[in-house]
Image (cartoon, rainbow, N blue to C red):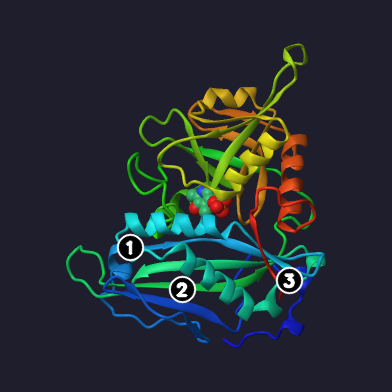
Amino acid sequence: MRYMKPEEIDWNNLKFGYTRTPVNVRCYCRDGQWGEIEEHAEETVTMHMAATALHYGQTAFEGLKAFRCPDGKVRVFRMDENARRMQSSAEYLRMGVPSVELFCEMVTRVVTLNKEYIPPYESGGSLYIRPVIVGSGPQLGVKPAGETLLLMFVSPVGPYYSGGMKGISAIIDRTHDRAAPFGTGHTKAGGNYGASLTSALEGHEKGYDSVLYLDPAQHRYIDECGAANFFGIRVDAAEEGGRAHYITPASHSILPSITNKSLRQIAADFGMEVEARQVELDELNTFSEAGCCGTAAVITPVSTIFDPADGKTYRFGEGVGLWSKKLYDELVAIQHGEVEDRHGWNTVLDL
Ligand SMILES: *Cc1c(COP(=O)(O)O)cnc(C)c1O
């Protein structure tokens, strides 16, 4: 597959998909020692056919973005958080664990080497960075690989919302769980995503945009919405002070989203009450807004949630709610350096 020259890319019509860029970076850990960062042009990886990634699912990934900003600089959002989350995935899956410094150096290198592929600010796009970590060494028994490969590639992606923020429909999945109660849900292990495909596709076949997962132990509390975290907004009655609450589920099987963590901080900055705790399904009745959040879309408003158990549909309005929009606008403004980066989230690159 040849790659497009930057001037051939139609920046205003990019989707969230793979576009080849000239360089990816790789680093191997052998016998507990990380080697030099390598730069590669090819899109393929050669590894042993008995690599543990291939048959035992020793693989995890990350996703983060770099933005071309109105001041001409490039900003990478919270890459140290992605580094730490990849560390926790790699630790749990017994792979080589990259240091935060190595992870961040590789992110900086792959963004710098592909800087012509960062979409212009005006297009609303960004450069999506995909770190992947795999057990690349051979093993026949179920044991960790002796070699770990950390690789990172990038792809320019379009804005998630081109025609305004539309709400999605979700169906509660009561026949599949995303992760086990004390399983791998808190990590970005590849297996979680292979295991969610049937659930997602069955949801689509039934006519829903996404599926809502409940806690796998009791199916009583809300866990996640597809591969994104879930939140709801509740506003107290005026006579009780009219305070807005940002409420998001807490559970061992939820992947700790960095977008959600950032939104919780921004909500607190706005003076909202932030609650991260178990959220019963019934509580959906008290939310005026609902949404899912993650790097790809920041916030996707949820318009309806259908529960096949009792045929009930919870409704949260068609488009984006007031508070969701405020939170979205503030996070995006921080990412683009348009308001003060008061929590030190951005790495600013002069590219
Ligand atoms: C990656 C992911 C998210 C979102 O995490 P961010 O750090 O905000 O991108 C949420 N849930 C699941 C299951 C994920 O894999």
Q: Earlier in the sequence, mark 1 or mark 3?
A: 1
> Ligand 1: does it lie within 8 Å of the C-beta at label 2?
no
Give the number of marks.
Answer: 3
Q: Is residue 99 above or below residue 112?
A: above
Image spot of residue 22 (x, y percent): 60, 84
Q: Is residue 299 above or below residue 235?
A: below
Q: Nearer the viewer, mark 1 or mark 3?
A: 3
User: What element does badge 3 sit on?
Assistant: loop
- Can residue 52 be seen here? The reply is yes
Q: Which residue is mark 2?
A: 151
Amino acid residing under circle 1: Gly
Amino acid residing under circle 3: Pro
Q: Earlier in the sequence, mark 2 or mark 1?
A: 1
| Quadrant (top left/top right/bottom left/bottom right) for the N terminus | bottom right
Q: Nearer the viewer, residue 68 or 155?
A: 68
Task: Categorize mark 2 by other alpha carbons within 10 Å: few (<14), some (14-19), many (20+).
Answer: many
**What residue is rendered at 52% in x and 27% in y?**
281
Distance (Cα) linking label 1 and label 3 = 33 Å
**What residue is rendered at 17% in x and 66% in y?**
141
Image quadrant where residue 98 sits? bottom left
Task: Categorize mark 1 by other alpha carbons within 10 Å: few (<14), some (14-19), many (20+).
Answer: some
Q: Which residue is mark 3?
A: 119
Q: Which mark is residue 243?
A: none
| Quadrant (top left/top right/bottom left/bottom right) for the C terminus | bottom right
- Can residue 206 be seen here? The reply is no
Q: Residue furthest left?
A: 141
Q: Nearer the viewer, residue 230 or 149?
A: 149
Distance (Cα) linking label 2 and label 1 = 16 Å
Distance (Cα) linking label 2 and label 3 = 22 Å
**What residue is rendered at 29% in x and 70% in y?**
32
Q: Which residue is mark 1?
A: 57
Task: Categorize mark 3 by other alpha carbons within 10 Å: few (<14), some (14-19), many (20+).
Answer: many
